[in-house]
Image (tube, helix red, strand yellow):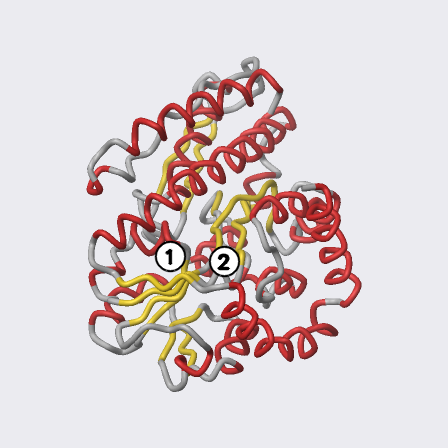
Amino acid sequence: MTTTTTTRFVSVVGGAFLGLTALSASAATEMPPLPDVTGDTVKADGDFEIKFSIGTTESGAQYRGLEYFEKIVEQRSDGHIQVALFPGAQLGDDRQATSALQAGTLEMTMPSTSPLVNMFPKFAVFDLPFLFPKPEMADAVLDGEIGQQMLDDASSKGLVAIGWGENGYRQLTNSQHPVEKPADLEGLKIRTMENELHLDIWRTLGANPTPMSFAELFTALEQGVVDGQENPWITIESSKFNEVQDYATETNHVYTPFITLVSARFWDRLPEEYQQLLRDAATKMGDYQRHVSRTLNDQIKQDLKDSGMQITELTPEQVKLFQDKLEPVYQDWRDEIGGELIDDIRAQVQQAQAQQ
């Protein structure tokens, strides 16, 4: 974003949030107005339609980001690119949508990095516990050379990776009892993504991890197939998990990004001018979506408390108990992910901490 655009954006979102805090809890998660579209009209030959699929619901920050992407692309292409949004895993979960991109039957999706680890093993670095102490430190990595290199690496296997967004810090919920220390997890059935590192984390903590599709999760919680799950506050609220989970712990145990993907088959049909438009729109979408996610995060946590959910906020000493328990996970995955990548990210995080 330019300085002028950033100032306007912060003003719009900040003003919207101040208004939001005065609303009732039931309305507190209304989204702020979409920023104005900036930039010249992009002219190129052809008319195109983009089906854009995500697994999260319409009430989440991710969908709000997609609405901004749609606005940018349609306005700046003068209507020659039309964007149709499909939230709530209507066209499949993250892995299914990614496969559809590879097959050329879907144009775009924005999955978490975690379900893609089998395709891109380095993405497992984002599943390491307690890697990013603050979200701004994740930004420094994703928006810098490391993040760009990972986008380049993911632009293969029938995919083109054009930007980052935020799924955010994952928090634990369950239906059995408060969790304040690793021993409280003993035997709990915790839904995880189909991701070996996540399975390793929860096994190491003493839980019984159970991988399943996000689309199946609410019903599984409701029926007691699993005791708990872990997702960002905004996903917990928008998916109404608080209706079937009495307890939550603010663990901030994993920061997960979203990655914006385009079908290579579709991409190769686009004029270069429209390819650049999609890249620009994806970057602005990511900036806006992160801001919406963080702006709403604390308010949503309060809403969940107001709804009756018992939320445990860990002290630094309690967090260290989880960190110490999970140290073997770093050693187990160092060779798989790449020790150099882990060290580079940790060095950049330390540098960002020193500058604060």
Seen as rendered, the residue at the extreme right is 340
**Front residue of this view, candidates 102 and 240:** 240
Task: Say which quadrant the N terminus sits in.
Answer: top right
Q: Earlier in the sequence, mark 2 or mark 1?
A: 1
Residue 277 screen position, x and y as percent: 58, 27
- Secondary structure at numbered mark 2: helix
- Give the amino acid type for the residue marked by disc 1 in the picture: Gly
Q: Left or right of 78: which side holds 124? A: right
Residue visible at 75% across and 48% down in the picture:
351
Determine the residue positioned at 31% across, 71% down.
174
Name the spot of residue 304 as percent of width and height, x first.
27, 53
Q: Position of residue 228 (x, y in %)?
A: 33, 72
- 273 vs 15, nearest the viewer: 15
Query: Would you call the spot at circle 2 few (<14 residues within 10 Å), some (14-19), or many (20 or more)?
Result: some
- Image marks 2 and 1: residues in contact by CB distance under 8 Å: yes
Dot 1 alpha-carbon crowd within 10 angstroms: few under 14, some 14 to 19, many 20 or more: some
Residue 99 got which mark?
2
Left or right position of 74 against 143: left
In the image, which disc is placed on residue 92? 1
Q: CA distance from mark 2 to mark 1?
A: 10 Å
